[in-house]
Image (spheres, rainbow, N blue to C red):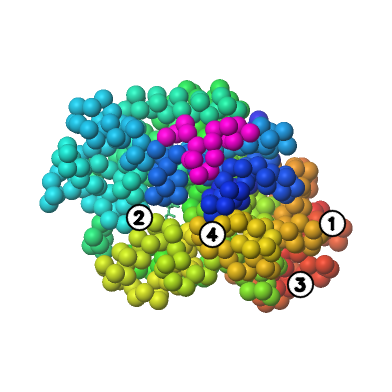
Amino acid sequence: MEKKWWQKAVVYQVYPRSFQDTDGDGIGDLAGVIQRLPYIKKLGVDVIWLNPIYKSPDCDNGYDISDYRAIQPRFGTMAIFDELLTKAHELGLKIVMDLVVNHTSDQHQWFQESKKSRDNPYRDFYIWRPGDSQKKPNNWGSYFGGSTWDFDEATKEYYLHLFAKGQPDLNWENPQMREQIWKMMRFWLDKGIDGFRMDVINLISKPEGLPDAPNPEQALYGNVEPVVADGPKVNQYLREMNQQVLSHYDVLTVGEMPSVTPEDAAQYTNLDGSELSMAFEFDHVTLAMNPDPRLGKWNDAPVSLVALKKTLSKWQLALAGKGWNSLYWNNHDRARAVSRFGNDTPKYRERSAKMLALTLHLLQGTPYIYQGEELGMTNAHFTSLDQYQDIESIEAYHQLVDRAQIVDGPTMLRYLATEGRDNARTPMQWDQSSHSGFTEGQPWLPVNPNYQEINAAQEVQDPDSVFAFYQKLIQFRHEKEIIVYGDYQAVDLDDSQAFVYRRTYQGQTLIVLSNFTAQTLTRDYQLPADKELLISNYADDQGPTLRPYEAKAYLY
Ligand code: TEU
């Protein structure tokens, strides 16, 4: 297998809106990212993935792009972006951009043209279908609530939007549209960026005839994901993208792929490099679902460790020697890892944040760290709806509590506090100054009050901090080939308290032991006497005893 630079890389995800504000408008900006490059460098990562920074009316925090070649004015200018790219490269940091091409904003010039008339040259850049006020083209329900179809009065047709109304889906069947996307991608790559994270890229090929979606519980709308994910031509489009664009550059590409199976991912990320480098799967972050399917992701049930282990193990094995995994607990759409998979009470927060880091970072794949994860930042613990800004959370509340009345308000607020996307989006906690050093203005989303205890200023100078622990794990990945290339083998998948696995490479073994509970566990893994303790989140080693949230790895 030809080795690629991104196989031993660690990626740091920056959500610019919440990272660092420099102009006092309460919204992070690109100058803020430049200011914090030394911090990112200090952590030791190789790559920065920037969430969308393009011009956008912001109905979905930049995932509704109105101009792919312009920078969102609130974030800065193209000159500042160029400076960011140059300075990052000077520090040896690569930059990966978000590529959002399943849909544009309804304010994009293509859509503005498309809706002018049925014979406009851009009409076919989007997905229009006939219908009337009584009859929609099909029963699909949007990710953000309501129908995926919006009626346009002027031309008397419906357009498709899998996400918000302001995010019309592009028509990938149209070769002129694809050509425009390739050109736009070359524009950024020719500037010198180092790759793309591709938003919902496995949803771009819609099934022939747009059939109705399954709707077993007779909800208002059918569940669209199973009918649009991994559609008939998605591999064809990705190979065309690869031939036309990606293969001419040495880049990291990661496809965000809701509900992708390991079998499909092995094809998308196959090692002949004909499609993408790697994929974000959703299995391990969607284990706790509400038993009432109408509530979907909205729940506050604990995540089962056995299910988590089985899922991660399945992905490790399925892609071994075939494709490449990406490893993540967190991103801008998910609850904070320490709150969801660990224990965010003061007693166990640091310990369990380190335990989660160790468990993930010694797997095979490319790890992604979401800003603040390296500090052990926690969920926001919001208690009222008006604290939220996220379109998904707000729409879900109105839909499920007010309109459908499937759940009561306090319960839904608990669900939002557990799973809502704004948990990840509260501002970065830099120091103890007002608004955690994020802004001198009013932050767009409240800062978590725990910034007094949890902040970067303290952690960078503490050799025992969560930050220092991440530094070590990143360094090990760079130094030890067993972490990058070793085979994976799970130990006792049915143990519901400890997550234990082995990696083996060239006659060496790395064993990773993590206690996911607040209890002390004793297990006998028959470890050899002449083993080396590589890393641990406790100061001393008690061999077969695993104290609360203890995690360690031995080499032998
Ligand atoms: O997310 C796609 C996606 O399928 C989900 O994560 C979704 O946003 C939601 O959380 C499901 O419950 C991507 C982006 O990461 C997200 O921020 C965007 O809102 C979305 O696409 C639309 O562009």
Q: Which contiguous range is marked in magenta?
A: 67-83
Residue 507, horizontal then vertical, whole percent: 78, 45
Mark 2: which amino acid? Phe
Q: Residue furthest right?
A: 530
Please state which amino acid type lies under the numbered disc 1. Glu
Q: Are marks 4 and 1 in contact (CB under 8 Å)?
A: no
Tell me the kind of residue under disc 4.
Answer: Gln
As measured in the structure, the alpha-carbon distance from the residue carrying label 2 to the one carrying label 4 is 27 Å
Classify residue 319 as left or right of residue 352.
Answer: left
Mark 1 in CB contact with mark 3 (< 8 angstroms): no
Q: Which residue is mark 2?
A: 144
Residue that numbered label 4 is attached to: 442
Q: Is residue 529 above or below residue 547?
A: above
User: Which residue is nearer to you in this view: 133 or 262?
Assistant: 133
Q: Residue drawn at (67%, 52%), measured in percent from left and top?
A: 361
Q: Residue at x 75, y 43 (%)?
A: 478
Quick check: is 71 in the magenta stretch? yes
Residues under labels 4 and 1: Cα distance?
Answer: 50 Å
Q: Confirm whether the magenta stretch covers residue 521.
A: no
- What percent of the width, then of the height, locates residue 86? 66, 32
* Mark 2 beta carbon near ligand 1 (under 8 Å): yes
Residue 267 shows in the view: no
